[in-house]
Image (cartoon, rainbow, N blue to C red):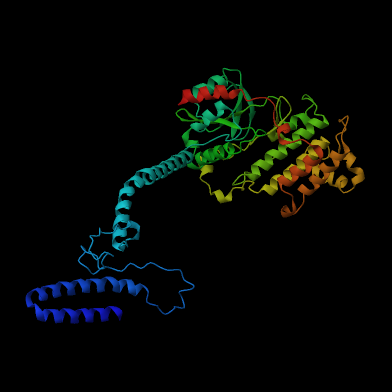
Amino acid sequence: MFMKNTILRKSKFYTDKAKHSPTTTATSYVSQSVHDLRMVRHHLPQEAKNLPSAPSALASSAPPRTVSVPSHGSGFFAAILNPNGTHSRRSKPSVDPSSVPVQPDTLVKKGNKSASKSWPKWIFTVVIPMTALILLIIMALVVVYRRNATTIHTWRTGLSGPLRSALITGLPKLNRAELEAACEDFSNIIITYPNCTVFKGILSSGVEIAVASTKATSLFDWSERSESQFRNKMDTISKINHKNFVNLLGYCQEDDPFMRMMVFEYTSNGTLFEHLHVKEFGHLDWSTRMRIIMGVAYCLQHMHDLKPAVVHPILQSSCIFITADYAAKIADLGIFSEPIGKENNNKDSSMAAPPTTHPESNVYSFGILLLEIISGRMPISEDDGLPILDWAMEHLKDEKSIMSLVDPSLMSKKDNELQIICKVAEACIHEDPKSRPTMKEVSASLREVIGIDPEAAMPRLSPLWWAELEILSVEAS
């Protein structure tokens, strides 16, 4: 109000003065009016700062916030005068890039550009190597599958270096000339069976072998069924892979002149039957008999644990060979079980007696074998023709008379071992096959008392014939 009154008084003063000097007074009036307006504009913003404002409910709680107000001026002069009443040029304010909003489209384009740059690198470092690795694995599996489908393999675990090398190409195929020289023109006959003959052979290194040959002399006597049986038998025996088994070393397959042979380990110490019932063979003491029992038990357990299980066709004392250090080796003597001649081979196979295919039958035979080993009695007595089972049952039912089961030629024995053997034998010969124990249970029960582990039951001599076998397999190939 004070400023307005001052302006009115001055206006009135200059109006009166203008009346006396029109030209000069008019110019001075205009200049003075402009100057007064400038002063008014200069003081109005300062007075506006002192104007009271209504208190806000949020003013006391929320901190002051700076709000940027866009300028509507030309961009060259400030919208508010300086205190001295003059305009001043103001440079454009610097803008923080982080405060500038970014459009979503821009982010998408940048992301796609970055992804497109890293995509080829990811392909070369991850996708291509992984694809190549998968292809290599598939190719290796195909090769292994084809090799297993066309070759027969022998021992697969616990092997020395030469034996592993022999397994790379499968079961060695030997030629007739090599075996003929080793077996002295096939004149050294060990034993003769209805359908095959077993020869003894000596390799150039001095290692002994056993060669089983079919009695068929031409392809006319050898049908497709005989060939299939020959190959299946080799495949089955080669899978057993146990040191208490007479393992297959190689085979011979020739058509002109005709020959089908299997080459096995040779044990030079006779069979268990001979040691128990033939006086010319060395006598077996109690501890040796216990080691033989455990070796047979562990081998049968291993055979039954295979997938599928391998069942011995005819388990008896004549099929168990004794090594030089008196360890047991089970042999499969049913090598060439097919009849000779095509007229016999072409008969309906359903009419033939089925082979032993159930592990329970081996358990039963093992029980009979236990009675034969501890008693030294023949499976069928030569005196009265009584089977050993009928004779032993009378003593097994009475614990006080089990001592009568012991071989009289034995100088010493262990009563606790005799008792467990009798209990196991009685369980094995149970009339109901489903009530018989498994060979795993039999081995565990016997080991708990006898105390012979699998390693102690195995032959201690190293298989030196593998060095010669590797040479033969290379020459045959």
Q: Is residue 377 visible?
A: no
Query: Can you name the residue that lies furthest to the front here?
Result: 20
| Nearer the observer, 200 or 341 | 200
Above-or-below relation of 269 to 7: above
Q: Residue furthest right?
A: 400
Considering every residue shown, the one lying at the far left of the view is 23
Residue 298 lies in quadrant: top right
Tell me which residue sits at (32%, 71%) in the image: 46
Q: Could you say which is closer to the camera, residue 204 or residue 375? A: 204
Answer with left or right where residue 337 lies relative to residue 418. Answer: left
Residue 51 image offset from top left, x and y in percent: 37, 77
Place of residue 379 in the rendered image (x, y in percent of width and height, measured from the top left)? 77, 39
Q: Position of residue 249 (x, y in %)?
A: 57, 30
Q: Position of residue 231 (x, y in %)?
A: 52, 38
Quadrant of the rendering where the C terminus is positioned? top left
Q: Is residue 12 left or right of residue 147?
A: left
Is residue 358 visible to us here? yes
Left or right side of 46 for 212: right
Horizontal side of 398 relative to 48 (left or right) equals right
How many numbered callouts?
Answer: 0
Q: Is residue 138 above or below residue 269?
A: below
Q: Is residue 65 above or below residue 169?
A: below
Which residue is rendered at x = 88% and y = 45% of the image? 395
| Image quadrant containing the N terminus | bottom left
Q: Quadrant of residue 246?
A: top right
